[in-house]
Amino acid sequence: MSTITIREALNQAIREELARDESVFIMGEEVAAYDGAYKVTKGLLHEFGPKRVIDTPITELGFAGLGVGAAMAGLRPIVEFMTFNFSILATDQIVNSAAKMLYMSGGQFKIPIVFRGPGGSAYQVSSQHSQALESWYAYFPGLKVVMPSTPADAKGLLKSSIRDDDPVIFIEQERMYGIKGEVPDDPDFTIPLGVADVKREGTDVTIVARSLMVPVALKAAEELEKQDVSCEVIDPRTIRPLDIDTIVESVKKTNRVVLAEESHPMCGVNAEISMQIMERAFDYLDAPIKRVSGADVPMPYAKNLENLAVPDVNKIVAAVREVAYLD
Amino acid sequence: MSKQTAAPPSRAGAEEQSSTSVIDAPADVDRQQLARERDEAKERQKDRFTSLNNEQLIDLYRQMVLIRRFEEKSAEAYVAGKIGGFCHLYIGQEAVAVGAISAIRKDDYVFASYREHGHALAKGMSARSIMAELFGKATGCSKGKGGSMHMFDKDLGFLGGHAIVGGQIPLATGAAFASMYQGTDQVTLCFFGEAAVNQGAFHESLNMAQLWKIPCIYICENNQYGMGTSLERAMSLRDIAQKGCAYEVASEFVDGMDVLAVREAVMKAVERGRKESLPTLLEIRTYRFMGHSMSDPGNYRTRAEIEKYQERDPIKLFSASLLEQKIIDDKGLEEIDKKVREEVEDAFRFADESPLPDPEELYTDVYANPIDSSQNRNR
Amino acid sequence: MATKVIMPKLSPTMEEGQLSRWLKKEGDKVAMGEPLAEIDTDKATMEMQALANGVLRKILINEGQSAPLGQLIAIIGEANEDIASLLSEAPAAAPAQKEEAPKAAEPAPAPAEQPAPQTQAAAAGAAVNGRQTAPAAAAASGRLIVSPLAARMAAESGLDLRLVQGSGPGGRIIKKDIEAALSEPKAAPSAQRYPRAVEPARFQSAQIAAASAYRDEPATQIRQTIAKRLVTSLGPVPHFFLTTDIEMDRAAEMRRGINALDPDLKISINDIVIKVAAAALIQHPEVNASFQEKFVRYYEQADIGVAVAIEDGLITPVVRAADQKSLSQIAAEVRELAERARSKRLKPEEYTGATFSISNLGMLGIDEFTAVINPPEGAILAVGAMTPKPVVRENEIVVRQIMRVTMSCDHRVIDGATGAKFLQTFKKILENPLYLVV
């Protein structure tokens, strides 16, 4: 075990997979000579050379499509978006090519590709650079969507994503690269996709949180502990496919649910989780499911407004108290 | 002043409508001029005969006829309701796919747009598997999940029909990139229509291809219409070959009604790809004799224009050359035509008699590694 | 000059009457001596005649509703006469609504919750919670607000949600409330419950204290047609009869056993019959029912009328909730009621509002007879004497204690097969009284 940041954990994962499999390469804007806009790819060019670590022009649709084509011909690309905001330019290739190729070719062409990069809210970069897009990608069958919240998850899940034969959308949280945690040193350490993690056990209320909301939910749970409310915090980690069983099991135990996410509420992932809980555990609910979401506005620049737009500990505490009938 | 006839009410019989609903302006046709142009083309074609033996030449002819007959049969099946959705026919453009694909190896890759039945046949896919795919049958090349616009054959290096205009251009660039990465000397042919040139994907791809020396051959089949919009109404710089200059990509203009001209140009591009790992852009001027799709009456074109290109029909032109060069006689041509018809009839029967996909197929092939959370949890 | 129509005295013992059916509606012309309404008395359904000429201006009591003797139930007057002063005499408890559910906007006085043909869940669960401000609204809406989990817990434990106070927002009953209710000691541990076809929350409580709660369901068109046609054939209550023989050996043995245990108990065969009938009724709610013209009323508990011969006739005191009482309770109660019946000390609520009646002439040596239904009940069971008879069992002639019963059914509400199935259950339990405890 070593204690490292999420940034370093991701770097280790990419490095280990580049070393493990010659067909793996990474491409994206500033990933090579610049060492990565967020330094996730630091040192990789030096170690693996320009064939395996490729700086691209600012041409997201082009290099995303190039990655999918390379995957059709047997490579395992890692495509970095400097931020997922820019993936919007590449959605045709992600959605119409990567997600559907296996199906419309009748199973002939698998697309082992990882599209990764930071997403979610950043710090004061305003509307176009600060948004959560996972619900877009989670919508499409054929894609897998992964969102780690700890260094160990980041490393284990990224390695599994690179080894997976399907297109994976791997969304790192821009604010979380510096978060530290223990990570196993074993180069074969992986975490399987599609398995939720109970980040904290509890009995009164289930909080489902992903990405940035996991540390926030854990802090809220600590606060609530002092108020005699025991919270179970579940991190789905993989948004598609969703490990709904783990969530439902928890709901059957606690009977109350708060769903936290920094994305907009409309058509969000939590809207889907909420529906699945209703379908699977209606008779176990003792209170309506409560969502805590990002504000339904484009992200503002001003610090005070930005703080209001992103869910915080207080909002989660208040929601938990509400479903526990404490207020 | 030209007169425009009314569009037909339904898509059924559209291919017949297309010949009567075009803009009728016969006065513009100078038949002597047409004949002169045709003869000149034939002369040019003769000069290229030396590069191939008789057997190869006859096979090119056979492939073009196969595509023509196959597409005619598709139209028939479409009108009969055997084929659903869209059905974009390749009639008139046969020389491009046949000429180009005759210039590459079996292990080279081909990407095409949604008008790809001809390319699939030229790459060696069987008429049966393509017709069955059109019929949405389990025996289709994509198990009935792709349809007219999504033919695939991994073993034959046919990497698909792609239905978003220009979407296949970055993909083809990627496959060629993979060949380069893997150190093989494979090349990739990427077919697209001239309307795709206006998409960002085209420009982004050409830039990367030249920048990174990717052996991808971009073949723009300029049939002069993006659905119903003519090139003139859609493109500021209409000399598409020139667009390669913007990215320093070698480019050339080619007569797409001459199968040998196409083959020759692609051969050069393939050599550039294999030896120098460089891309090429070819603008191949061609013409589709039918509407954009089976539901298109084609009433945006003049009769004179269609007649002009029909005079340059690549199959007619090539058969005339073959006869003149005494490479084949009328009987030989008839023999080929008969065999091709049998092959197409057989494909039709095969498709018609094949079973529909099993309902369980609905949920297969979504993921290569489907995830069972409950099993993974115990890992 | 307007004329008051009051609940008339239609039998010597009558103290209140239930309005069974209005034969005129508001606005109809009426002539003196013309039938105005049908009234259910403790004895029979009787016609009430108009005692004035004019127009039936106002109806103050709904069908199915009861009123004590002398209460103003309608007004006859001239078409445009001012009747306001007379109306003010009407008890507040009688808003004149006919065939119309109380509108949510009108504050309906509690006792007047009237049998519009719809079920209403009691709002007991929406009682005021200290912290909440919303419960009043929930109570007014009449809905029982309950979390899915609490609803399931209540259903699984057989808890009546109307008895649970909700502590959630808007008076929502939540897990905590169910747990609290379940941890309380049971009010009546002896109460026996039988499997129910209808969950408790759908019943509404009766006006007579301790009488069975009920739910009203609109009489279907076919039910109304059956009723109409049968009435033209057989009179107001079209009877049909079902007879069966019951082997009483085991029941008799059980009675001997119980009485040997404690001679003070003095359980009679009739007490067992009452208990078994009650148990069977709960399993066949369609027999524990009453035809009410526009709707059919289904009762929650089995209130059994027991015919008792008295000096100048007959009266049927009611054993309330016989399904929930033990045999000894039933025996004691019947004994006590019969005694007071004979000395004419029964209160009206003690001999009205049964959901089913039993008449036993076995002690008078009658083998078999038919009884007349006491409207608006749906059925009555005529019980004959228990006598040893030869019967064939496993190809041998043996002697068994046989009791023959005949059930009279109101064909407007009970059909042949429905009654037969009930009788089947009744027979099964009576022949094997162990079913009472399993």
Image: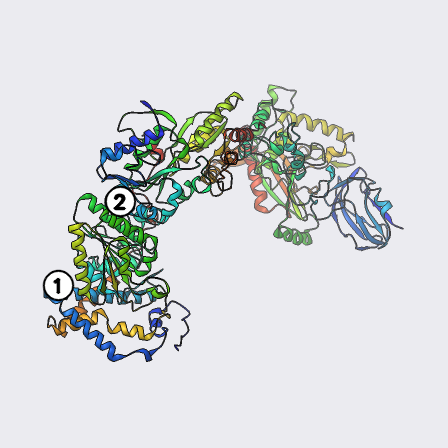
Q: Amino acid at mark 1?
A: Gln
Which residue is farthest right? C1
Residue B77 place in picture, x, y as percent: 31, 65
Residue picked out by circle 1: B56
Residue C332 place in picture, x, y as percent: 68, 25
Q: In the rendered view of the protein, which quadrant contains the N terminus of chain B? A: bottom left
Q: Secondary structure at mark 1?
A: helix
Residue B116 place in picture, x, y as percent: 27, 59
Tell me if mark 2 has few (under 14), some (14-19) or many (20+) residues whose alpha carbon lies within 10 angstroms of its own: many
Along the line of sight, which residue is nearer the eye, B129 or B89?
B89
Tell me if mark 1 has few (under 14), some (14-19) or many (20+) residues whose alpha carbon lies within 10 angstroms of its own: few
Residue A225 falls left or right of residue B267: right
Q: Residue at x 33, y 79 (%)?
A: B26
Q: Amino acid at mark 2?
A: Ala
Compared with B375, B78 (above or below) is below
Q: Secondary structure at mark 2?
A: helix
Residue picked out by circle 2: A71
